[in-house]
Amino acid sequence: MTSNRENPFLNLEYQTSLEDLGDEYYDEVNATRFPQHTLRFRNNDLLNHLGLIPHDVKDTDFIEIFGEFRKIRPFLALRYHGYQFGEYNPFLGDGRGFLYGQVKGVNGELYDFGTKGSGKTPYSRGGDGKLTLKGGVREVIAAEILHRVGVKTSRCLSLIETGEKLWRGDEPSPTRSSVMVRMSRSHIRFGTFERLYYLKRPDLIKKLLDFVINTYYPDIALDNDRYGLFYQELVKRKARLVAHWMAAGFCHGVLNTDNMSIIGESFDYGPYAFIDTYDPLFTSAYFDHGRRYSYGNQPVMVRTNLEMLQLPLMSIIPPKVLETGINQFSYHYENAYREAMLKKLGLVGVSDQGNELLETTIDVLKTSQINYHQFFIYLIDNINKSWWEKPANILQEINLPTANWVNWKYIYNKSLNQYSSDQISSVINNLNQFNIRVPFLKSKIESLWESIVYYDDWQPFYHLIQNTMSSEIKTF
């Protein structure tokens, strides 16, 4: 393989931030050796964030670092517990991955390289610690689509097929294997704190919380009320995150506390799905028989997880301060959801009729059962200046079977007229910016996988990712 000087990844400035916390928070582990390494995905966009020029980074560089796992710093399997489907589980932790390293991006922020599928750790609980290739492909797709529509999310830096056959109960087996590297702001979870509460270690909770605030919440690090401000800010971030999921029509599927990032970032995509139609009961995880993590229940569950986090935080933050923080969840969620949905309708900065338009839009989507994503594409494809003249001109091409359809046109017309008709290009730009044409429904993702598994044809997958990443990115 390449030498130190030749491989740009080896020359990044690796940090020891989490490592310096001490081994109460992690176990040093080794990576599994794989029989083969075929690079299936490399995220050149993320290379730019690291100050690397994609042309200068070879595929073999990815394989040496993120497939053969040439060691620069100790590999750390993080310790955590969590509430899984409402039941506390003290036997969790990084069971098929580890923290490869931490680096500073060109923006000065700290980023984690976290593996998935890199082999057994002390927390594998009898599993093989491996990742199916299909699981890796699905996570790449989820992360890139969510990033494109403005969700704060981890992203996949690389996906390497590893040449093993894996047996799984939820995939036709044997199935192909892979190892993925996820780049995120942090891999610290709610469950990282919950483990320390379970072990009755308030000293370690405080040490970890100080680290989180100093590293990820620097604006409040020197404030005398920094602990309470941290929780208030976390509540705001999580409320905005789930609001953006809902606007994107995204159902995470497994909102256990071990899947909740302490900095409010979206990560760890397993049985996720995007809704076909607006259905609050839609549930993406086949094993979620009680619909606990259904699409419509996501805001409730994120708030519940924030409430659970109060238990370990109470050793530092007074209960009344925590209560003040959590009481702001609905306010932040409703504002973020309204803002995100209005942007999907092409309306940025529109306040009048905002609540009325949102409520009517949801009613139309729910009662008509039109394809959720196609509805917004109809707006992009058909909008013209006549929509400003009278409501009847709006979407004459379709007639939705719902009593509120005419009323929706009337309210949308009023909202459009907060822009002048000469500003139609601005509305069109908004529609294109906050919606996506790339088909990402379950059936499409399955067809991509069929091309791979039956014909080893990766072009449909690459085409999807290229079309997703080629659009200008702007967060909500």
Image: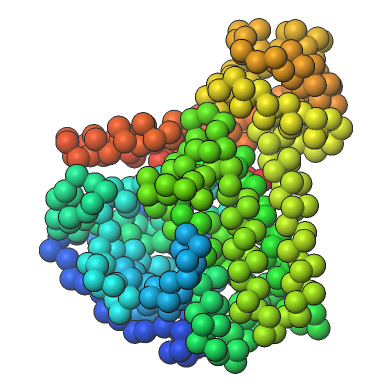
Color theme of the render: rainbow
User: Does 8 appear above or below 280?
Assistant: below
Give the x, y percent position of residue 175.
18, 50
**246 with respect to 9 (left or right):** right
Q: Residue at x 41, y 61 (%)?
A: 182
**153 with respect to 116 (left or right):** right
* In the foreground, 371 or 85: 85
Give the x, y percent position of residue 141.
41, 45
* In the foreground, 212 or 49: 212
Residue 269 visible, this orientation: yes
**395 with respect to 328 (left or right):** left
Name which quarter of the figure residue 464 lies in: top left
Q: Residue farthest to the front?
A: 290
Name which quarter of the figure residue 208 lies in: bottom right
Give the x, y percent position of residue 151.
58, 49
Q: Residue at x 60, y 57 (%)?
A: 302
Q: Residue at x 30, y 32 (%)?
A: 447
Q: Residue at x 17, y 55 (%)?
A: 167
User: Does 20 appear above or below 264?
Assistant: below
The quadrant of the picture occupied by the N terminus is bottom left
Residue 1 visible, this orientation: no
Name which quarter of the figure residue 463 lies in: top left
Give the x, y percent position of residue 31.
25, 74
